[in-house]
Image (spheres, rainbow, N blue to C red):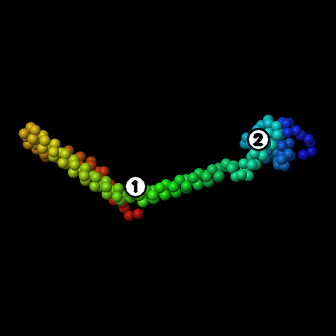
């Protein structure tokens, strides 16, 4: 750089490019990107430019590819941790396999049906006893059957071979 300049002078893109040994278009990109503050002095631009170089040299520059890789690494770590947690739960019997759950639900459905039938019968018997009457169960059967179908519809299918 042939002319003397003061770091307190208002910076120009071409002057700063000569100062740091790069091109004016490269400096224009830094100004446009906000790395270098418009209207600032050569001294401020020099500080901002050096900071940018330090960040890039330290690998701290955040670009789209780096962000994507960091997000992918974080997802991979989270999934690995979740898998390990499930294994620990399985070992400690805090998590059940799907077949055990399916069987439990089927059994619970059977228990529910039996409890419902028992409750219906007990209600009929209590009414018959209290009023000294006999209740014809045939007209009640469609309602009982509908309730049993509803209870039974919660059964789940066994796992198919994959």
Q: Residue 54: where, in percent of width, then height?
A: 75, 49
Q: Residue at x 83, y 40 (%)?
A: 42
Q: Quadrant of residue 134?
A: top left
Which residue reaches farthest bottom? Answer: 161
Circle 2 crowding by C-alpha within 10 Å: few under 14, some 14–19, many from 20: many
Q: Nearer the viewer, residue 71 or 12?
A: 71
Q: Tell me the tag on residue 129.
A: none
Task: Tell which residue pokes out farthest to the left in this image.
Answer: 132
The residue carrying mark 1 is 94
User: Residue, x 12% and y 40% (percent of image)?
Assistant: 127
Can residue 28 be seen by looking at this rendering? no
Q: CA distance from mark 1 to mark 2?
A: 57 Å
Q: Do we see residue 7 in this rendering? A: yes
Residue 67 lies, in percent from the top left, at 63, 50
Q: Nearer the viewer, residue 27 or 120?
A: 120
- 48 lies left or right of 129: right
Q: Give the mark count.
A: 2
Q: Residue at x 31, y 57 (%)?
A: 103
Q: Residues within 10 Å of mark 1 (few under 14, many from 20)?
A: few
Q: Position of residue 10 (x, y in %)?
A: 84, 36
Residue that appears at 23% across and 46% down = 147
**Where residue 59 sits in the image (x, y, percent)?**
70, 52
Q: Nearer the viewer, residue 93 or 152?
A: 93
Looking at the rendered image, the quarter that the C terminus falls into is: bottom left
Asked which secondary structure carries label 2, the reply is loop
Mark 1–mark 2 contact, CB under 8 Å? Answer: no
- Left or right: 3, with 99 as reference point: right
Q: Give the labeled residue for mark 2.
A: 36
Give the secondary structure at mark 1: loop
């Amino acid at each position: 750089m042939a002319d003397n300049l003061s770091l307190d002078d208002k910076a120009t893109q071409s002057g700063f490019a000569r100062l740091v040994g790069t091109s004016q278009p490269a400096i224009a990109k830094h100004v446009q990107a906000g790395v270098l503050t418009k209207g600032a002095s050569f001294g401020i631009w020099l500080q901002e430019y050096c900071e940018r170089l330090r960040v890039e040299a330290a690998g701290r520059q955040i670009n789209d590819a780096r962000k994507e890789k960091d997000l992918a690494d974080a997802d991979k770590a989270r999934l690995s941790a979740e898998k390990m947690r499930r294994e620990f739960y399985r070992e400690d019997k805090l998590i059940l396999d799907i077949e055990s759950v399916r069987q439990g639900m089927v059994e619970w459905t059977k228990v529910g049906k039996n409890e419902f039938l028992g409750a219906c019968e007990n209600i009929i018997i209590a009414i018959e006893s209290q009023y000294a009457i006999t209740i014809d169960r045939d007209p009640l059967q469609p309602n009982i059957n509908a309730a049993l179908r509803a209870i039974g519809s919660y059964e789940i299918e066994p796992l198919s071979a994959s």
